[in-house]
Each structure stands twice: as C-alpha cells, then as structure tokens.
Amino acid sequence: MIKATNLKKAFNDRKRGQVVAVNDVSFEVEPGEIFGLLGLNGAGKTTTLRMLAGLLKPDIGTALINGIDVTRQPEAAKAKLGFITGSTGLYGRLKAREMIEYFGRLYGLTRNESSQRTVKLMETLGMAEFADVKCDKLSSGTKQKVSIARTMIHDPEAIILDEPTAGLDVIASRSVVDFINNEKARSKTIVFSTHVMHEAEKLCDRIGILHKGSIITTATPEELNNKSGCVDLDDTFVKLVGDIGA
Ligand SMILES: Nc1ncnc2c1ncn2[C@@H]1O[C@H](COP(=O)(O)OP(=O)(O)O)[C@@H](O)[C@H]1O
Ligand SMILES: [Mg+2]
C-alpha cells in the first residue's frame, strides 16, 4: 500500500519568494490499483512523488510505503519501492544489459539473481534487440526501457512513475503503458503522474486532479466524466480546473 497523508512542501524561490508546491495532499493506493496524479505543468506532481519516494523531505505530513515511513526508514522503504522518472541517468558506456545487471548488484541481488531478473525484464519490455547496445547509443524510447528495467530490478511492490512516457513516441509510450498494466496484474501498488489525459483515462483506476498544489477531486475516470457532464477526460479536466479558477 502507498499512503500520502497531508503532504506539504514549500520552496524558497529567489524570484518568486515562497512557493507552496504541494499543499495538504492525501491519498491511498491499494495493491493491484493504479492511482493517477493528473495536473498541468507546475501543479506539484513531481514534488508530491519525490516526497512519496523519500527523495524530498515534506515540511508537513507523512508518506508510507507498505506501512514504512519513508522519512524515518528510508532504506527499508526504498527496498519496497521503484521510482521511475523521464530523466533517469544511465551510464553511457555500459550496454543496456550491463546497466540493468549492475543495478541488481547495487540492490543486493547475487550475480545470478541479477542476470536472471534482467533477462526476464528485457523480455517483458521487448528489449532483446538492443541488449548489447551501449546506453549512449540508444533512442529515447529504448533508454526509457533501460531506466524502467533498472528501477524494477528488485521487483518492488510499490511503483511510482513520474511522467514515464514524456517525450516518447506512440509505440514506446504504448510499451510503457503495457508494462504498467502488467505490473498492476501482478498486484503491484502503482502511482503515476501525467498531464496526458487520455493516458490517465485508459490506465488509472482512480485519478486525483492536482491543481496548484492541491488535489481538487479524487474519483474514477468515469465518475469524473459523470460529475462534469463531459464525454472525455480532456473536457472534464478543463471544466473542473476552470470551475475553481485556472
Ligand atoms: N527546487 C525548487 N525550487 C523552487 N521551486 C520549485 C522547486 N521544485 C519545484 N518548484 C516549484 O513548485 C511547483 C510545483 O512543481 P512540480 O512539482 O515540479 O510540478 P509538476 O511536476 O506538476 O510540473 C512549481 O511552481 C515549481 O516551479
Ligand atoms: Mg513534473
């Protein structure tokens, strides 16, 4: 289970003064469920997810991964967690396969475990063709697959993805989406952020609309559309955000 309770984070920005990036955000996600954080650029998605993943300390509030407080027990929480962003660094000189195996070793897997798990992930993500290509020679879609595989090497129960399809073409996006769905079927607890409405609509069991740091509503995609009287999430989003003042 992933649980965010009253998360708040403000930054001191040189130009803008104090910026409240995330204000009192709470939600809970069960195993086998995909929760989407949907919001415009600057809404506070990344800040929320970084607090959930234990990469940023909240000013107020708590983040629990399977009951473990990520601030108090960061190592224990990280063992249960995979955090995927669109901008994960790879070591250019390592081959795709080596990169993934290397991370397995960092997570404490034996050489054997790491290489078996790497084979499995490369199969799931359709990476056979570029397993032996160096990371700096890969396209952005294939790089993202390597990033995902390396983050998932320890088969974490909770998965947090921050705009994992940003900048990917439709085929690469599709395989990331398929991967997320496959993990859901394996009873993983999943939170992901996007500003792509149709992606959220297709993938998420529930969506929290994040606007200016606050969740303005949480519901299933269908409930959101019913509530707004619109046929798709694009229109619903614009209406809900417009109603409270964009
Ligand atoms: N390190 C930082 N310093 C100052 N402001 C920040 C910092 N990180 C994020 N912000 C601000 O917090 C707000 C939310 O940002 P972010 O969480 O990145 O939103 P999103 O991921 O939804 O685009 C924005 O106004 C952003 O400029
Ligand atoms: Mg972001």
Image (cartoon, rainbow, N blue to C red):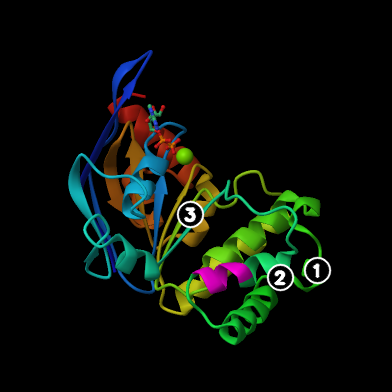
Q: Are marks 2 and 1 in contact (CB under 8 Å)?
A: yes
What is the three-letter code of the residue carrying label 3?
A: Glu
Q: Amino acid at mark 1?
A: Asp
Calculate the distance from the C-alpha at mark 3 to the C-alpha at mark 2.
33 Å
Q: CA distance from mark 1 to mark 3?
A: 36 Å
Residue 104 against residue 222 in the figure, above or below: below
Residue at the image point whose x is 18% and y is 47% from the top: 61
Instruction: Tell me the quarter of the picture where residue 134 sits.
Output: bottom right
Residue 5 can be seen, yes or no: no
The percent position of residue 52, horizontal first and vertical second, equals 32, 53
**Residue under the image location 31 percent in, 46 percent down:** 227
Q: Name the amino acid, label 2.
A: Arg
In the foreground, 226 or 105: 105
- Binning the other alpha carbons within 10 Å of mark 1 as few (below 14), some (14 to 19) or many (20 upward) gives few
Residue at the disc numbered 1: 132
Q: Is residue 103 magenta?
A: yes
The residue that mark 2 highlights is: 97
Residue underneath mark 3: 201
Q: Residue at x 22, y 69 (%)?
A: 67
Magenta segment range? 102-106
Q: Is 36 covered by the magenta stretch?
A: no
- Residue drawn at (78%, 73%), measured in percent from left and top? 128
Give how far across and how far down residue 159 sits, in percent.
43, 64
Closer to us: mark 1 or mark 3?
A: 1
| Secondary structure of residue under mark 3 | helix
